[in-house]
Image (cartoon, grey):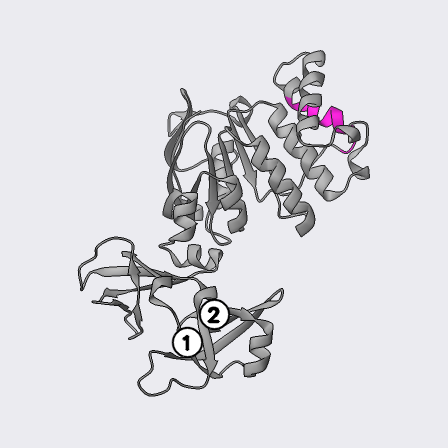
Amino acid sequence: MTLRLSAQVAERDVDVELSLASGETLALLGPNGAGKSTVLGVLAGLVRPDEGRATLADETLFDLPATWLPPHRRAIALLAQDALLFPHLTVRRNVEFAPRSSGASRAEARARADQWLDRTGVHPLADRRPNALSGGQAQRVAIARALAAEPDLILLDEPLASVDVAVAGELRGMLAEVLAARTAIVVTHDALDAYLLADRVAVLHGGRVVEQGPAREVLTHPRHPFTAELTGLSLLTGERTATGLVTPTGLALGGTPTAPIPEGRAVTAVVRPSSVTLQAGTPVDGSAGIAAVVTALEPRDDLVRVRTDRLTALVPAAVVAELRLTIGARVTLTVPPAEVRISPA
């Protein structure tokens, strides 16, 4: 079901245009307050834009100011962060509710509920009440209920945010399976969700779409600082030189262009922190090292993200201890030119 959306919500400073092909999953990324939940609310019919138009397949969801389809008449399912199951109904009855509310017979609703309870791995819990479920189990039931409605479009708002890391991994795998070939939008802060669940990515910042495209392309070659931060990459902007690029702050790096780029052209470069090596102290005269100052140390399991005023490095904790790194320490950074990917700005 092809989706086309253009909407402006002045009060929330949101002005977006999005399109989604039938059977595609779009990951909607962005910082808090960027407008992600507002976009879902507009599509679900819970937020009325000041102006705009949206169509899903051959149906007009709204074309303001003349047309506005109420939420219950839209073939759209919205799954919030919290499961929001009906506490007085069993798991099976919760899932049956969706097809029953759209006119299915009791027998048809039960068959559809059992099908989705099987696919989401919670059929053995069919006769339990929600208060007897774990957080991960409740979220699986909520996903089954949303899909049992057989919506043309499914909207998922941070579906893994309320479960722990171990459960999130299991749910992510299940979602990848049940969303395959379904038209869906997933709001997430996690790059892994985008990699594993989405065909395409759109990045919202300040209520506007600042970057979009195929998921792997956007996440491996980001053009916006938020996207780079989300994926753990360093994003540089500057001018193409004969051997690489130079930034406005004077940082010169050798690099590898993704396509022929003439000197003097505005470019961006992506650097993986794991490709940056560091040594304590300032560069030796005549070396190609980059002088930098440590601005933050962020532990990541057995690694440490070392942020500097130049680039970010990702190194083993043992290296941090050996070099006695502290905030304010002077270090020398080295990046192989083959690890600096340069693209036209």
Is 300 left, or right, of 50 in this rendering?
right
Which residue occupies 35% across, 54% down?
Answer: 223
Is 167 left, or right, of 305 in this rendering?
right
Which residue occupies 60% across, 75% down?
Answer: 318
Quick check: is 41 in the magenta stretch?
A: no
Predominant secondary structure, magenta span? helix
State which region is magenta.
87-98
The C terminus, quarter of image = bottom left
Residue 43 point in image, percent of width and height: 48, 33
Which residue occupies 38% across, 25% down?
Answer: 66
| Residue 120 occupies quadrant | top right
Number of disc labels: 2
Residue 65 point in image, percent of width and height: 37, 29
| Residue 17 occupies quadrant | top left
Inspect this view and state whether residue 89 appears.
Answer: no
Considering the numbered disc 1 on the image, is that residue within a helix, a strand or a loop?
Answer: strand
Considering the numbered disc 2 on the image, is that residue within a helix, a strand or a loop?
Answer: strand
Q: Which mark is residue 333?
A: 1
Is 104 left, or right, of 235 in this rendering?
right
Query: Which amino acid type is marked by label 1?
Result: Leu
The answer to whether the residue labelled 2 contacts the one labelled 1, judged by CB atoms less than 8 Å apart, is yes
Circle 1: is it few (<14), some (14-19), or many (20+) Cα within 10 Å?
A: many
Residue 111 point in image, percent of width and height: 70, 17
Q: Which residue is mark 2?
A: 313
